[in-house]
Amino acid sequence: MTAVLPSPRTAGGLLRPRRQDRVEDGERLHSLLWVAGPGWRMISSAVLGGGIGERAWVLNAQVAHGYRRTDPDRHLAGLAAAAGARGPGVGLMTAADVSAYAHAHDTGAEAFVTAGIDVRGWAARPDEGTSGPQPPGTINIVAAVPVALTDAALVNAVATATEAKVQALLEAGHDCSGTPTDAVCVAARAPGPGQEEHAFAGPRSLWGARLARAVHRAVREATAAP
């Protein structure tokens, strides 16, 4: 069993990610594990722990190109357990090398981004979408703010992070709005006695603006041409 050791907290309150290494099918792959601990609510589009609720950790796992498993939620849960994560959490996956993540912060808001944009395009296309499981997402965003947000504000935060991602991609010269399977996770403090619960997280709100700037900078760095 692998113990999760303490590490310094970011300005947003999340622990800095710890890298986990493993070998699958003869290929060396990496994962990033954030251990937030109790007192956090998260919203995510992730295959494991998606939706809105209290979550204690986030795992962003690299998988092999051509990933064919049809149970990614069970796969991620097993990886998280092997890394020492306990309780409910969020699991994301990507074919990109997660050890090359980008990190940015803005006055308490934090963003970590892993990106590979070989398969990219625009969200609105004339052809129909495909049904069923998709290949693992390529641009994964894990962000945090050290304040409590209402459910509506959490949804707003996802929209804000996505807008900032698209802005960064366009400014970097990428002709796309993202990849077909991008994923996002935004963490906020759970409301407590005497703690203000913010009702807005749009790009012109206090925490939405900080979140947008952090995500924008991290996506620009993660998708910059070498």
Image: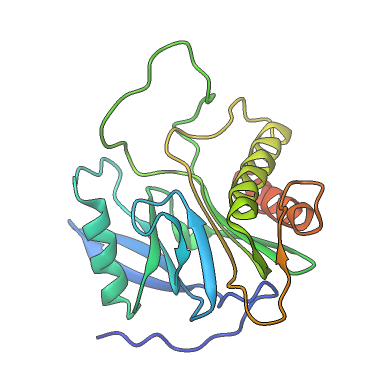
Instruction: Residue 17 in the image: state x and y as whole percent.
Output: 51, 72
Is 101 positioned to the left or the right of 49 in the image? right
From the viewer's side, name the closer residue of 199 and 109. 199
Instruction: Residue 55 in the image: state x and y as whole percent.
Output: 45, 70
Is 75 positioned to the left or the right of 20 in the image? left
Q: Is residue 27 visible?
A: no
The residue under the point 37% across, 72% down is 20
Is residue 6 depicted above or below 59 in this figure? below
Instruction: Residue 164 in the image: state x and y as whole percent.
Output: 69, 43
Q: Is residue 151 visible?
A: yes
The residue under the point 81% across, 58% down is 206
The residue under the point 61% across, 51% down is 152
Is 35 positioned to the left or the right of 61 in the image? right
From the viewer's side, name the closer residue of 36 and 121. 36
- Count of marks overlaid on the render: 0
The residue under the point 62% across, 43% down is 159
**Coloration of the structure image:** rainbow
From the viewer's side, name the closer residue of 38 and 101. 38
Instruction: Residue 77 in the image: state x and y as whole percent.
Output: 27, 65
Quadrant of image for the C terminus: top right
> Looking at the image, which residue sits at the far top?
126
